[in-house]
Image (tube, rainbow, N blue to C red):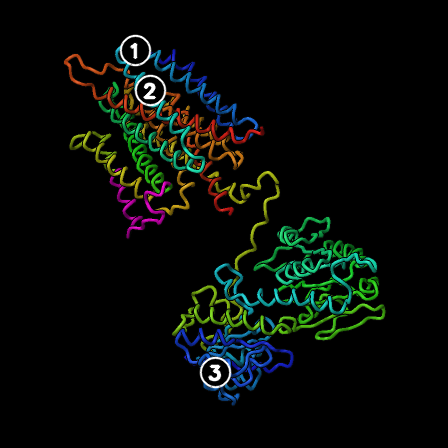
């Protein structure tokens, strides 16, 4: 891929995304902001596709898959009731998480960097992307299920749940060190194990939170999906992806405030 | 345990510490209740009503006190009663611990655990034991009733066939619980109500009850601890007097409720103000017991001045509505018993509420308790920050040092691991650092862009950021555009993962943007 050719459209897309978010800040400019976001996304997509050495056969697959995805998204967006909006957003977050996990694993099967340092960096990024992605995936799914009413709103409080979370995080840390250090056992098994832990952790984290607090959780997951994409961006050495910053944190904070209001 | 409800002895006290209903609840908790004969008479509760609920009626006063393990009462005990108490007895009543050192010493000497109902900490958890607010509420209401009676004019204006009557103008000084109750009661009767308080927090409360909030042009907060006001500076008080002199010519009824804990009531309505008031006007001084807010107040008396202004210094306003006051007080007593353990009462001095109330315990005077918490911070001053409490701001910057620390840690790690001489860092490390730069900058930009978003736009914003998070599709594209079939005919897993990622991310991108579009359409004016 030609990074130089890509960096100009990516820069344009990034600026458009920033303008988009800025525009969403007030009613007068919100609709324009949304359009700017779409344009930015389109630019990033076209630039990527054109810069990849895409063979015509795989372009067909990519196009088919992308169109199917777009169709599903469109149907979802037009059918969903306004009151069901938060649960749809939660579900979409889980897609980002799942996509990140997939891209992470895909990246494992791809190149691993040329130098020793490059390999360490790449593996760390890969691990982080998969891990956060997995937490976001199940966390968002549970949030969706709670909002939809599939799972009861009552918090599931396991005995020693903080200890459980801590053990999960620590175990992941150990796995990360082993994985990056390439010591002992198959790295792929470790990555899968870490992903499994992260999946459980994500579900458990959100299950322990009551249904009424879900809007805040969704905001937080929004931030997580931003972190996920950023981690994936590091992994794939792609600046446009890194532009997904943890902006959700602010939204979480303010929606926490607005939830506390009534 | 045996709980005693003695009859109140002071002449103006009509309240009682238990109602028939509360007796029933105490018995249900597993206690034996002894009520002194005639205890509830003045409040409208007959001996028979108590008996019906299972209480024992005892006519000998001394027996009531001597046999009690717990005494629930309203006013402080007199010397006789104190002498009849035995060691280990729990006594709960108003004790005014700040001004009754003598009584506290006597109670401590007898080994009594005295719980002062007027020393309950003003914290959220203790609200169910807050008799002061309950009584102040009644007193504020009653003050309006007394004023209306003495004033003798409609509170609300009326236009009748026989002529028009202007509405009464009421000024309430001190918008605490009693003051707000007075504002509310006077408004409901149709009066024009103004209220003054040194605490800015009261403005909204007064206005929400339909009153006009008066202030002086000096920026000074009167917020003291525990929901009370503090003493103000000389300049402030001068400005206050000027305002009151102006008001004195206009208003018909003045209700003063200003109290400062542990001090005599501040003099706010001076002799010269009373002299400029219209004939027939009324001043009700709720602070009469602490010396009065008005120069001319005489405690427990109705004074009429030379220029025909009536000054009511009743100290028993809550007691004048003895039935309601007793019911609320008795409820608090049941809450207190539950707080102390319900069935077997114990004094836990580690508990903030119990510690605050316990003024004598195990032979010692335990007043005053350790210092209470500082007053709450002033409310936000900038109007645009109304949606976000100002106190949140400094805390939310905590991530800045976190990011800094992270960067420093990454650098130290890299330096230690790969920084040796002769080890080239290479293009990949270079690229990583560039990406890190982009990432950190993006964090800042994102933070600032999102900072002042309108609350109504949170959901659309979240949908858009969500759609933009779908940028992960680029990762999918990088991988998914590789040939799906390897040269040996097997499937390339990278491409498969990439394609599925494209599918998921595309749902996200399309769904996120379109749903935002739909939401924003609702904001359109047409």
Number of numbered markers: 3
Residue at mark 1 to residue at mark 2: CA–CA distance: 18 Å
Residue under pointer 2? A66
Question: Which subunit holds the residue at mark 2?
Answer: A
Residue A175 appears in view: yes
Image: magenta residue range: A148-172
Asked if residue B184 is positioned above or below residue A164 in the image, the reply reads below
Both labels 3 and 1 in a single chain:
no
Of all residues, the one furthest to the front in this rendering is B161
Of all residues, the one furthest to the right in this rendering is B307
Q: Quadrant of residue A228?
A: top left
Residue under pointer 1? A53
Q: Position of residue B228 (x, y in %)?
A: 61, 60
Asked whether B192 or B436 is in front, the reply is B192
Of all residues, the one furthest to the bottom in this rendering is B60
Q: Secondary structure at mark 3?
A: helix
Both labels 3 and 2 in a single chain:
no
């Amino acid at each position: 891929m030609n990074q130089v050719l890509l960096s100009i459209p990516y820069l344009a897309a990034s600026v458009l995304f920033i303008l988009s978010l800025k525009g969403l800040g007030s009613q007068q400019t919100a609709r324009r902001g949304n359009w700017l976001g779409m344009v930015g996304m389109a630019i990033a997509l076209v630039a990527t596709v054109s810069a990849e050495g895409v063979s015509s056969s795989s372009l067909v697959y990519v196009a088919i898959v992308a169109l199917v995805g777009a169709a599903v998204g469109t149907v979802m967006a037009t059918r969903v009731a306004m009151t069901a909006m938060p649960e749809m957003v939660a579900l979409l977050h889980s897609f980002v998480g799942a996509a990140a996990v997939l891209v992470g694993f895909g990246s494992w099967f791809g190149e691993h960097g040329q130098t020793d340092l490059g390999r360490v960096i790449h593996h760390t990024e890969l691990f982080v992307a998969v891990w956060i992605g997995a937490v976001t995936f199940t966390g968002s799914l549970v949030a969706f299920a709670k909002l939809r009413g599939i799972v009861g709103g009552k918090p599931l409080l396991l005995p020693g749940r903080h200890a459980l979370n801590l053990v999960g995080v620590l175990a992941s840390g150990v796995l990360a060190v082993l994985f990056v250090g390439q010591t002992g056992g198959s790295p792929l098994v470790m990555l899968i194990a870490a992903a499994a832990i992260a999946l459980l952790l994500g579900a458990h984290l959100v299950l322990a939170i009551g249904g009424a607090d879900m809007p805040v959780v969704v905001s937080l997951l929004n931030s997580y999906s931003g972190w996920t994409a950023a981690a994936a961006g590091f992994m794939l050495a792609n600046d446009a992806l890194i532009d997904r910053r943890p902006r959700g944190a602010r939204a979480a904070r303010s929606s926490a405030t607005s939830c506390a209001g009534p | 345990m045996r709980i005693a409800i003695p009859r109140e002895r002071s002449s103006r006290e009509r309240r009682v510490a238990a109602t028939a209903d509360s007796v029933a609840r105490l018995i249900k908790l597993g206690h034996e209740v002894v009520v002194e004969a005639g205890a509830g008479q003045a409040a409208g509760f007959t001996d028979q009503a108590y008996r019906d609920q299972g209480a024992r009626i005892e006519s000998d006063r001394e027996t009531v006190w001597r046999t009690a393990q717990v005494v629930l009462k309203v006013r402080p005990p007199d010397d006789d009663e104190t002498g009849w108490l035995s060691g280990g007895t729990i006594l709960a009543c108003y004790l005014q611990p700040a001004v009754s050192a003598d009584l506290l010493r006597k109670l401590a000497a007898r080994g009594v655990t005295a719980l002062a109902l007027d020393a309950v900490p003003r914290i959220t958890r203790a609200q169910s034991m807050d008799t002061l607010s309950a009584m102040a509420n009644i007193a504020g209401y009653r003050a309006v009733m007394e004023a209306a009676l003495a004033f003798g004019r409609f509170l609300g204006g009326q236009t009748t066939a026989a002529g028009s009557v202007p509405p009464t103008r009421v000024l309430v000084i001190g918008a605490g619980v009693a003051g707000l109750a007075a504002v509310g009661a006077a408004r409901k009767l149709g009066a024009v109500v103004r209220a003054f308080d040194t605490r800015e927090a009261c403005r909204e409360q007064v206005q929400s009850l339909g009153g006009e909030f008066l202030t002086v042009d000096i920026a000074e907060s009167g917020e003291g601890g525990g929901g009370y006001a503090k003493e103000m500076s000389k300049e402030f008080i001068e400005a206050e007097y000027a305002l009151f002199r102006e008001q004195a010519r206009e208003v018909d009824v003045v209700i003063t409720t200003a109290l400062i804990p542990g001090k005599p009531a501040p003099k706010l309505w001076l002799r010269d103000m009373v002299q400029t008031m219209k004939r027939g006007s009324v001043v009700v001084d709720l602070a009469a017991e602490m010396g009065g807010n008005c120069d001319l107040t005489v405690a427990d008396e109705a004074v009429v001045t030379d220029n025909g202004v009536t000054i009511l210094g009743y100290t028993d306003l809550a007691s004048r509505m003895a039935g309601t006051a007793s019911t609320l007080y008795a409820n608090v007593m049941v809450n207190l018993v539950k707080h102390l353990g319900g069935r077997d009462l114990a004094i836990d001095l580690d508990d903030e509420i119990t510690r605050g109330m316990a003024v004598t315990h195990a032979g010692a005077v335990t007043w005053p308790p350790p210092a209470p918490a500082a007053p709450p911070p002033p409310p936000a001053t900038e109007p645009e920050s109304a949606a976000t409490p100002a106190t949140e701001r400094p805390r939310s910057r905590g991530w800045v040092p976190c990011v800094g620390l992270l960067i420093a840690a990454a650098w130290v790690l890299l330096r230690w691991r790969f920084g040796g001489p002769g080890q080239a860092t290479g293009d990949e490390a270079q690229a990583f650092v560039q990406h890190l730069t982009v990432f950190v900058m993006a964090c800042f930009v994102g933070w600032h862009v999102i900072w002042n978003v309108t609350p109504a736009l949170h959901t659309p914003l979240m949908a858009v950021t969500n759609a933009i998070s779908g940028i992960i599709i680029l990762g999918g594209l990088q991988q998914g555009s590789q040939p799906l079939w390897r040269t040996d005919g097997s499937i390339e897993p990278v491409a498969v993962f990439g394609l599925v990622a494209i599918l998921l991310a595309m749902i996200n991108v399309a769904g996120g943007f379109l749903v935002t579009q739909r939401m924003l359409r609702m904001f359109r004016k047409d």
